[in-house]
Image: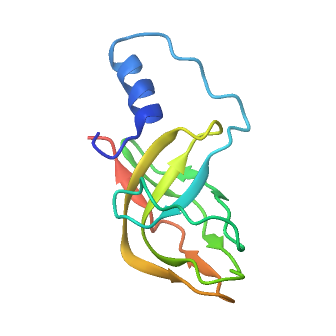
């Protein structure tokens, strides 16, 4: 579970201990953010056309991916290069994080997209 953030680890651990865990209330708001480092924990861009985007999980069993294509931008300034991603819960807690397979340059005037199914992970 190394890519689970604190919010994800807390929920998973409670389930494994057999504790009651309240269901997410629909619609449960999950957002995808980008980060400068490959751990997904530092360097999230700020403003200039960047905003966290809605994220919907898809998959079977322990394997998961993003159900829909996700677009960021257009950017109104150069925001640098991102190498990681973070999936946040509605309160801003880190549920999942990881490395992008290809770094993305966020340049002024661009919109960057991530294809459906491109963000993958599993709980193992």
Q: How is the image coloured?
A: rainbow
Q: Is residue 53 above or below residue 87?
A: below
Depth check: 107 or 11 in front? 107
What residue lies at 40% left-to-right and 78% top-to-bottom? 103
> Residue 3 placed where, x, y %?
33, 47
Q: Position of residue 98 (x, y in %)?
A: 37, 57
- Describe residue 69's horizontal placement relative to residue 48 as left or right: left
Q: Quadrant of residue 39?
A: bottom left
Q: Is residue 42 left or right of residue 109?
A: left
- Taking the spot 65% from the left edge, 39% from the top edge, the residue there is 90
Residue depicted at x 64% and y 72%? 72
* Position above or below: 54 against 37: above
Camera-side residue of 112 and 27: 112
Residue 67 position within the rendered picture, expressed as x and y whole percent measured from the top left: 57, 59
Query: Count of labels shown?
Result: 0
**What is the x, y in percent for residue 53?**
66, 60
Which corner quadrant holds the N terminus? top left
Residue located 53% across and 61% down the image: 44
Q: Which residue extends farthest bottom?
A: 109
Q: Give left or right: position of 75 versus 9.
A: right
Q: Specify the farthest residue to the top.
A: 19
Q: Nearer the viewer, residue 49 or 58?
A: 49
Give the quadrant of the C terminus: top left
């Amino acid at each position: 579970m190394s890519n689970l953030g604190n919010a994800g680890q807390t929920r998973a651990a409670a389930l494994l201990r057999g504790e009651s865990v309240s269901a997410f209330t629909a619609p449960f708001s999950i957002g995808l953010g980008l980060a400068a480092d490959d751990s997904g924990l530092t360097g999230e861009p700020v403003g200039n056309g960047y905003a966290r985007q809605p994220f919907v999980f898809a998959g079977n069993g322990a394997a998961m991916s993003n159900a829909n294509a996700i677009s960021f931008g257009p950017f109104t300034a150069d925001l640098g290069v991102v190498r990681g991603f973070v999936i946040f819960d509605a309160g801003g807690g880190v549920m999942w994080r990881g490395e992008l397979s290809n770094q993305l340059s966020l340049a002024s005037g661009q919109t960057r997209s991530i294809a459906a199914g491109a963000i993958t992970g599993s709980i193992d």
